Image: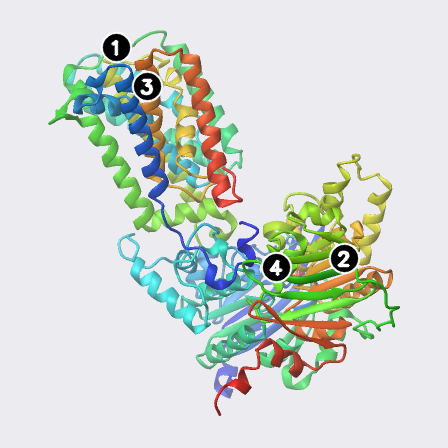
Amino acid sequence: MGAGLSMAEAAPRFEMRGIRRTFPGVVALDDVSFSCAAGEVHALCGENGAGKSTLIKVLGGVHQPDAGTILLDGKPVRLNHPLEARRHGISIIHQELSLLPERSVADNIYVGREPGRLGLLDRAAMRAGAETWLRRFGCRFGADAVAGSLSIAEQQVVEIAKALVFNARILVMDEPTAALDETETERLLALVRQLRAEGVAIVFISHRMRHLFAVADTITVLKDGKLVGTRPRGATSPEEIVRMMVGRELKDYYPARRARAPGAPVLTVAGGGNEWIEGIGFELYPGEIVAVAGLEGSGKAALGRAIFGAAPFSRGQMVVGGQAVRPNTPLDAIRLGIGYVSDDRKAEGLALRQSVLENALLAMRGIAAIFSRPGRTAPRGRGIDQLLREVDVRAAGYDQQIRLLSGGNQQKTVLARWLALAPRILVCAEPTRGIDVAAKAAIYRLLRAYADSGKAVLTITSDLPEAIGIADRLLVMHEGRLAGELPAGATEEDVVALAAGHQFEAAPA
Amino acid sequence: MSEAAAIAAPARARVRSGAWLAPAMIVLCSLAAYCVAAAATHQTGQISVDGFVGLIQRTVALGIVALGQTLAILVGSIDLSVATLVSVGAVMASWMMQGQPDMMVPASLFVLALSALVGVANGLIVTQLRVNPLIATLGVGLVLQGILSASFQDFAGSVPKEFQIFAYGTVGPVTLSILLMFALALVEWLALSRTRFGAHVYATGGNPEGARLAGIKTARVVVLAHMLCSLAAGLTGLYLASRLRSGAPWVGRDGVYDLESIAVVVIGGTVLAGGKGGVWGTMSGVILFGCLDAIFTMAGVDAFIKQVLRGAIVVAAVAAYAYRTKGHVA
Ligand SMILES: Nc1ncnc2c1ncn2[C@@H]1O[C@H](COP(=O)(O)OP(=O)(O)OP(=O)(O)O)[C@@H](O)[C@H]1O
Ligand SMILES: [Mg+2]
């Protein structure tokens, strides 16, 4: 696509040859070669921990390769610091958000490349430039907003703007769509196509096949730090890519639903509302998985936090197991048997410098400490090892510091933490964000098995196919209210229509 | 990040505002308390231009050190060697001058160069050897104090009359040193809010890894901040030599400039983790401590109670900021 014949003959915009990179206990990259031409979108896929982020960090000057060379426009270069990569026109959206929470959006977008003369900042230019990008994404916050007060999706948009404000010749996006809803994703993909037409070399990393196949010209698969293969998009299929990633055929992606015996609801919310949501009413039964869908800002995240007491309901009623309750803090909720997998694992989910095992045990300690002091040798401690294996956390060892794990494996640890606690209601916000297909399937199976054991699961997800695939029922939110409920087997169109609030019908033809 | 903020609807995104509000309130309350105390103890003479100048004058040494400490803390570091460096500056200045006017410039330059060197050493130990800044600067401070105490037992030398202009010279009713402190505050504020260096200071303190990924040479920023912090301490040493007419190896330690400077920075709303805060907050903390001292002196209250109250104020301030932002703890 895009690249004409004459361009194809020229040296690629960048080429990485025989890259090897090791960390204590892991070979993250082993003899990997990867390249991208001007005007090409090259997708990179692989399981969690396959080495995708490491590869682009090598390109970005964050990590230095143990072996191998990097060529830019045919000339070998050494990139010892992100600044040097930047000087060569390489711009990277990193997987882990790296914003300054206390600074404004404009400050964040221009961090490290502040405009101005003689070391003086040109604040007007910063604000104007930031506003331009925010408008392009249809953002509802301004350049003066404090980054830390934005939602995860909004922060993601800021990260994207940060990488785009300077005219990159090479743009790398490490899971840019993980936190975005469908509308925002469409905008981003449109932008990617536009940049490709302008001749930017683009690397696109995502676990969502749909997005990959929507923009990529070429797809490269990594597995366990090794290159599996590179295919032109036209000559491959999602099934083949998944097979290359996982090493086998992936069957029964979504687990089968089981007919459930109707019983008393474990959770009832009536007329629930707070600052962000209004008039919420629904029931949740033991043994079912209910998915909450909706656009970013529709209040679906707020609903999860309200139930968990992180941003409690201020109006309405909540009944858990037949008793009227009002959890005002997460601890209240945990005591009531409500678990919560956060969508912002960095800010609140994980203790980054502690080990995988410590993190997995965290929630359990939170309540158990009231009665006793469980060590890692406590009976349930062994259960954790088992669970970590089941959700397939890949680490050099469970004693490894969690910040050194790949993004997807961090997410799995958070999930294991809550499964270990066995709450009767498990609320999951974006449980599979940044998780590879095989692990997703494993998590779906785990959640289904969990529901089958008589527990109730409420998942809040921006991934529509996922919501439809695993849920027994779908709740769709729009502008802080429940727009409707759909049974299993609903189509994406049904959900989108509800989530958009039937705007099409209201608009004059 | 505040838990509730993470899910805030877009329209509710918080905008940074009122950076002036807390410092202004602190200053106003402190001065009001000072006036009330003066009136209550029938020392109304203190409520005059001279009274206020005297009040500010007594804060100059702490103020200059704290301006430097603000930088160190903003980049996510801290400096415990400042008190010793103040002593080193004062002693070296008076010892080299020995009352001779023509040694004023060389001695001052030497003190400042030495301070800068100590600051760079602090910065390199923190960034290159990756020693925790508390330990690194504590160590450097102990080494310096050891050398100083071994070499000088008492007041060493003296400064010439001309050098005392630094501390005692006046412009109208105000002293030169007060003007110097506010000029430094103004310059630092401009540097932090209007320059690329300032932006990099906040970035480095706010998210070191993110700043590095954004292409900022964070180690360089930390070293520079430490250098400026030590320069401020050295300058304070010169000021004390000028004010006391000589320098002794205990002047810094007696002023408790290390802990007090950290205290006023924190009272001013700068977060110990770095990346948030600023100059005017620090200055308001300095004025608060100055007023507190004056009030207790006027009331003739025991120095121990003063310490207790200072400690309580530091803790209360941090708690108040933490409550306001519902999350970050200094
Ligand atoms: N700084 C580090 N120290 C030690 N090990 C690391 C470090 N960074 C990455 N690793 C390890 O290198 C391997 C590759 O990680 P990487 O982050 O590149 O995976 P990934 O393909 O991006 O996965 P994901 O899809 O989960 O983001 C993992 O085993 C990870 O634990
Ligand atoms: Mg990754």
Location of mark 2 (residue):
A425
Judge by depth and name the residue closer to the eye, A18 or A420. A420
The residue positioned 44% from the left and 21% from the top of the image is B309
Q: Is residue B103 above or below residue A436?
A: above
Location of mark 1 (residue):
B157
| Precedes in sequence: disc 1 or disc 3 | 1
Percent from the top left, x then y, of residue A467? 70, 72
Q: Is residue A470 visible?
A: yes
Q: Quadrant of ligand 1?
A: bottom right
Q: Amino acid at mark 1?
A: Gly
Q: Is residue A215 above or below residue B42?
A: below
Location of mark 3 (residue):
B295
Q: Amino acid at mark 3?
A: Ile
Q: CA distance from mark 1 to mark 4?
A: 61 Å
Mark 2 chain: A
* Residues at marks 1 and 3 on the same chain: yes
Location of mark 4 (residue):
A54
Q: Is residue A47 visible?
A: no
Percent from the top left, x then y, of residue B276? 43, 44
Badge 4 marks a residue whose secondary structure is helix
Badge 2 marks a residue whose secondary structure is strand
